[in-house]
Image: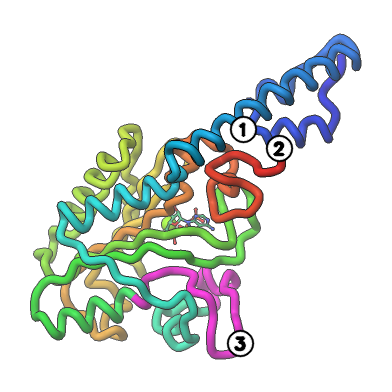
């Protein structure tokens, strides 16, 4: 029995062929090559059609649509304000997150020089902005940011070095003891807005980080939520209850679009909205 050659398999994978198909077996090489040629042509046509449709009609890749739906929901229905903060942050900002030696993120930071790095998360900037806004208004602060975060990852199908996080924080408007309830409410509403019904909320307790809540679909973590009072809060001059959730935009798109690898749907010059550009 014959299998597709490695090159054929790579090409089929690139074109989004089903894994079962890629592992098919054949009587002889000529049958295999025939089927490869036909399938490749079909897949190329399908990907071309999809790209043409995007250019002519949809205009917005799935990841962008997800981002926009969440932004619309947060600003119009939930009273959150969008902020944008720098992608380059200082070492001292990172220190305040206590990303010390035993923290999993320590070795994942992209340093620009001894004092500056690319942000691996949005939390340091959001802590600062929410605290300052609360000082001015003396009222609850609801803000969110959506932007690139950077982590040195061992790659794999679910991780990219640059990915898009949407991080919301609801500060000083929640009764102590009600944080998990609020987190669940926000998670459920977010999933509804995006159109995901089959997800789980996984709650974990940790000595250091308190309770956390992940939104998981199948085996894939699509978002992580946490709340305070938290041991980091005093360093940021934050003393009131808050909840926050970080959504991985490409993880959500990957899951909704049924893509097996995240890089197809992420920021890329090789793929657009899941389709390869080398057709
Ligand atoms: P994981 O355990 O899957 O590596 P994490 O728990 O380290 O993720 P968080 O810090 O919770 O990630 O980040 C919030 C969300 O951002 C995650 O739930 C995930 O959806 C997304 N995310 C995190 N790292 C990456 C990455 N390298 N590439 C794409 N998305 C990511
Ligand atoms: Mg997480």
Q: Which residue is more in the foreground, 150 or 173?
A: 150
Pointer 3 with pointer 1, Cβ within 8 A = no
Q: Which residue is more in the foreground, 254 or 218?
A: 254
Q: Which residue is mark 2?
A: 279
| Residue 219 seen in render | no
Mark drawn on residue 113: 3
Marks 3 and 1, how far apart in space?
43 Å
Q: Mark 2 or mark 3, which is nearer the start of the sequence? A: 3
Figure quadrant of residue 197: top left
Q: Which residue is mark 1?
A: 48
Q: Position of residue 136 (x, y in %)?
A: 13, 84
**In the figure, is residue 141 to the left or right of 51?**
left
Pointer 2 with pointer 1, Cβ within 8 A = yes
Mark drawn on residue 12: none
Main SS of the magenta part reads loop
Q: Which residues are magenta?
A: 101-125
| Residue 75 seen in render | yes
């Amino acid at each position: 029995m014959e299998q597709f050659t490695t090159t054929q398999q790579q090409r089929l994978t690139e074109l989004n062929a089903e894994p079962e198909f890629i592992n098919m077996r054949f009587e002889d090489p000529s049958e295999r090559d025939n089927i490869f040629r036909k399938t490749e042509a079909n897949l190329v046509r399908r990907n071309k059609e999809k790209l043409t449709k995007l250019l002519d009609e949809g205009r917005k890749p799935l990841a962008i649509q997800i981002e926009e739906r969440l932004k619309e929901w947060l600003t119009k229905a939930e009273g959150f304000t969008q902020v944008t903060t720098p992608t380059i942050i200082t070492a001292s900002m990172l220190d305040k997150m206590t990303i010390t030696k035993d923290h999993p993120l320590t070795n994942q930071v992209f340093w620009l020089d001894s004092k500056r790095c690319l942000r691996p998360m949005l939390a340091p900037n959001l802590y600062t902005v929410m605290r300052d806004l609360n000082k001015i208004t003396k009222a609850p602060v609801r803000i969110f940011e959506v932007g690139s975060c950077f982590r040195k990852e061992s790659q794999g199908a679910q991780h990219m070095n640059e990915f898009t996080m949407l991080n919301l924080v609801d500060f000083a408007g929640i009764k102590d003891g009600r944080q998990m309830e609020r987190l669940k409410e926000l998670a459920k509403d977010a999933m509804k807005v995006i159109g995901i019904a089959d997800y789980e909320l996984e709650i974990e307790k940790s000595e250091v980080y308190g309770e956390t809540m992940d939104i998981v679909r199948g085996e894939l973590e699509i978002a992580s939520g946490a709340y305070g009072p938290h041991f980091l809060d005093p360093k940021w001059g934050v003393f009131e209850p808050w909840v926050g959730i970080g959504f991985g935009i490409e993880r959500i798109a990957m899951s909704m679009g049924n893509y097996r690898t995240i890089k197809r749907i992420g920021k890329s010059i090789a793929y657009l909205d899941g389709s390869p550009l080398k057709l």
